[in-house]
Amino acid sequence: MIRLALRGVLAHKVRLTMTAVAIVLGVAFVSGTYVFTDSIKASFDTLFSDVNAGVDLYVRGVSEFGNQLPRIPESLVDEMLATPGVEIVAPSVDGIAQLVDKNGEAIGGNGPPTLGFSWVPEGEGLTPLEIRDGDWPRHSDEVTIDSFAADANDLHVGDSIDVILPVGVERFNVSGIATFGEADNLLGATLAVFSQETAQRVFQAEGQVSSIALVLSAGVDSTIVQTRIAGSLPDGAEVVTGQAQTDDNLEAVDEGVGFINTILLVIAGVAVFVGAFLIQNTFRIIVAQRTKELALLRAVGATAGQVTRVVVFEAIVIGIVASLIGVGVGILIAMGLKAAFAAFGFGIPASALIVKVRTIVVGLVVGLGVTIAASLVPARKAAKVPPVAALRDVETPPRSLGRRVAAGASVTGLGVVMVVVGLVADIGNALALVGSGALVTFVGVSMLAPLVAREFARFAGIPIARWRGVSGRLAQGNAMRRPRRTASTASALMIGVALVSVIAVFSASARAGVAGALERTFANDFQVAVSGFSDPTASGLSPALTDELRALPELETVVRDRFGVFRFSGSEAESFLLGFDGPIARVMEVKMEAGSVDQLGPGTALIEKPDAERLGVEVGDTVGIDLPNGASVDLRVVGIFDEPVLGVPLVVDLKTYEDYLPLRLDRFIYIDIAPGVDPADAREAITGVAARYANAKVTDTEEYAAGLEEQIGMVLNLVVVLLGFAVIIALLGIVNTLALSISERKHEIGLLRAVGMDRRQVRRMIRWEAVLIAVFGGVLGLVVGVGLGAAVVLAVGQGLTLTFPVGQLVIYLVMAGVGGVLAAIVPARRGARLEILGAISYE
Amino acid sequence: MNAESTAARVENATKIYGSGSTMVTALDDLTLSFERGKFTAIMGPSGSGKSTLLHCIAGLDALSSGSAYIGRVRLGDLNDKSLTLLRRESVGFIFQAFNLIPTLDAAENITLPVDIAGGEADKAWFDEVVATMGLGDRLTHRPAELSGGQQQRVAAARALVSRPEIVFADEPSGNLDSKAGAELLGFMRHAVDEFGQTIVMVTHDPNAAAYADRVVFLGDGRYVNELADPTATQIFEHLKSIGG
């Protein structure tokens, strides 16, 4: 039996290759993701371990959560020097500093942070930074920058450069260019290194440092010293081992690559899922084509179980071979990703590619599992072939669709319920539930699809039959004759189209929501925000900009806010807050459920309605929050707002913010111009000031809304591009189905050729069949996708205005049809080249 | 026999398959003509070259050497496109099996060659052919809803509907029971007598061959001899005598 299965694989090499391609691609994405992220982690592991190997202890601020450590008093440096057993004391002052290129454009700030460090001679060899050109910043007017920023912007030692800092924009001379280990930068972050006094001044850390690295004298027991130091440290400071610091550094890197990992794995999952449809379809067709062979097996005494095993065993062989190839291709993908990241300025220290056993095992399990699972239904069908089928042509009567309706409807229902529950219910991991609900829905709809496939093909085929004559009529008939096959081929495409449609609906709704909310809320004339797309807890505008703007006579009101992280007391989930400085009501019309914006002051807060309801707080009550530096504060609620435009559940005033949060950069500036001032003049004045701050972008409300919409669109378009991968696999499925159908119908095509159909007409017939299948998949995808998208939008509710981007959806449908034409190219050519005689000769 | 009365012919036709030790000579310098308006049967043992002859003269396969003609047209001079057009306009086919397109109903199958050519079927002629083949009440049925005999009659109607120069039939009754086979052959005979259709049929069934005006016997790719207006018994006896 095993030999038979192997022969079967060899006999169907070509058609199984297509199947294998789907598995290879899916497995390659899964394993490539692991290889890539493992390699990144391994290279940073090596780097940090090397660096921190020289450091015995670190003294640093205590941070409960968030990504910024509070600073500690500089006096601790002297205390450390006085501690017995401590040989080297190397303090560091960290902050945020954005470089400006020669054209006055900000460098970086699109995602990765823009880091600032201090350098002291004692720290030589105790940081991951290595000087490539020039020297460290030994004077107050010097800066050392990372080599990616230097090379990409044609900056050299001796050049002068503007740097945006909390104290304003200042000009420095480039004293040196540094690498991060062997990488040009740290995962895309830009670096600016200053002398310690300069760092303290520009980061507003007078009398403070961020951390202190300690090297102990030889032979000193570090635990004893650590205990001794720990006993003498003030509140808010702690001493940890070099190893603990390494682990924390690595955790930050893990977080950084974690999102890449998640995105890639989700896409890999979609690819595998789509691939499963393709595999199942291929096996189903192969089984149908081998009916006689399988019946012969039954006739000579094989049991139904044996026949099933032959098919499943074939699946296993293909699964193993394709998965192994997939792991190999995955390694190539990882290399490509690494190269792409380096090219786009995300520096990764050099290291070998790490292929863990886990990667190979996961790849094999996924590839093999999907292949076997997808072959089970066709294998069971194979076992039902009656022995008599070997002796004559038996058209297996189509099974009753009643059970299929029931099963398909219940699966679809289950999927929809999962999606709805995930969206509405307040449970952990709701996103996973929504995602798997969507997948279950896809399976359910694909089970129901054969019910409508025939009618769809008939209906959609009418114009084709009219327009393309007999070729079109035959294409219509061919698409109708095997509704199950048409449906399951189309289902693979449905998934891809559905996913991009969900995103299209969500994106359009989000854009409409943003535009609407801004229009309602923004009562100001101009805004200044950070250009680019970066973490608002680690970037921002220099507060000096606000001060300069407030001095302008053309402006009446200048309000700013800062962004920070906190937790509601008793909750593990991190939330974000805004700290406002200035009369909010003058620049915004925040829709209030209760209380008033005007009451906001030190020790008070505004809270968003859903959280107020969840916590059961009303105006006048207090709400407890925990802050990154370990502080817990009770704030008196003075207002409950019902407007998601702020994007955060809690608003405090700037005084409260500065008491507990470390960031000294502004997120956003709201500007109201003075009465009687021409907006154009005001804008000129604002721009005149903001021009020096290269990361500041001045907009009026309309431009700002457009910019936000563009950002939303860009992010979602990126996801659509990545999902295009799933669409390509689905198109491979159409290629495969057509190729198999053609070899199945070669007699028919031979007959058509014999009675006078020319090759062009044959190609046309196959092409239009492909278009019908693809458009069917596209329509199913649009229906499911728009439904899911609308569900998501309605469930999220706040900030979204349900909008259907009809034009975009129509474009998707047209693209599906074009995809069908492309998928048909090779099969159509093969069909047209069939030897007439071979096709009509009898077996 | 002059060119006007010849519907199709082969001259010094040789067809060789394979090469070296696997070389098979299917047609060996064969010269043969088919008279217009006649029903000719080709007989011979398996491997005698009768199917190869049919394929080559119908333009489905190319000769290794020699010439094949439909009317005055030499097939060897035509490219695939022209051959397709020739088949479309001048040749009808009836095969043993796989004769109909399952997604089309009987009427659509009958008009298929006309539809492919982008023309309109001659309604009166269509009705006449359909009536001759006894298919009047079956036109809207799909092939799967027709009996084997009905399917072959649809195929025969399709072969006739474009008024081809010549109809080639390859064991048309091979898959039918004797009653359905007799019916089909009767209809084909009728088409020759009534419409003056030229039919060339390959068969190894003496009963089928007995419907023909002329039975040509082949052996090893060569012409052996022929009988005019034979009965089934005569053919049977003759086959025995030549060792078929």
Image (tube, rainbow, N blue to C red):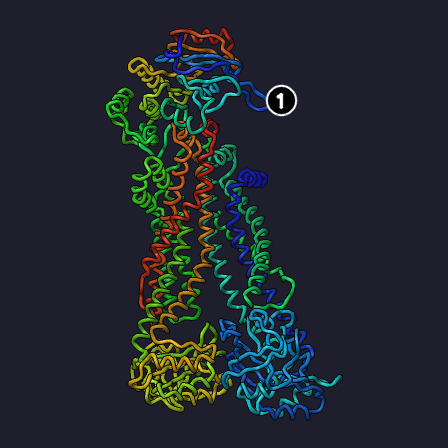
> Hey, which quadrant is residue A737 in on the image?
top left
Crowdedness of circle 1 by 10 Å Cα count: few (<14), some, many (20+)?
A: few
Residue at position x 38%, y 15% from top? B7
Q: Position of residue A650 (x, y in %)?
A: 39, 82
Q: Quadrant of the N terminus of chain B?
A: top left
* Residue B19 visible in image: yes
Residue at position x 65%, y 72% from top? A181
Residue nearest the viewer, comparing A538 with A67: A538
Residue nearest the viewer, comparing A202 with B123: A202
Q: Tell whether A93 sits left or right of A462.
A: right
* Residue A567 visible in image: no
Give amino acid for label 1: Ser
Work out whether A653 lies above or below A491. Answer: below
Residue at position x 34%, y 75% from top? A701
Secondary structure under badge 1? helix
Work out whether A60 lies above or below B119. Answer: below
Q: Position of residue A776 (x, y in %)?
A: 36, 48
> Hey, which quadrant is residue A793 in on the image?
bottom left
According to the image, label 1 marks what residue? B21
Q: Position of residue A440 (x, y in %)?
A: 41, 57
Work out whether A585 lies above or below A422. Answer: below
Residue projecting furthest to the right: A219
> Hey, which quadrant is residue A521 in on the image?
bottom left
Q: Tell whether A404 sits left or right of A256.
A: left
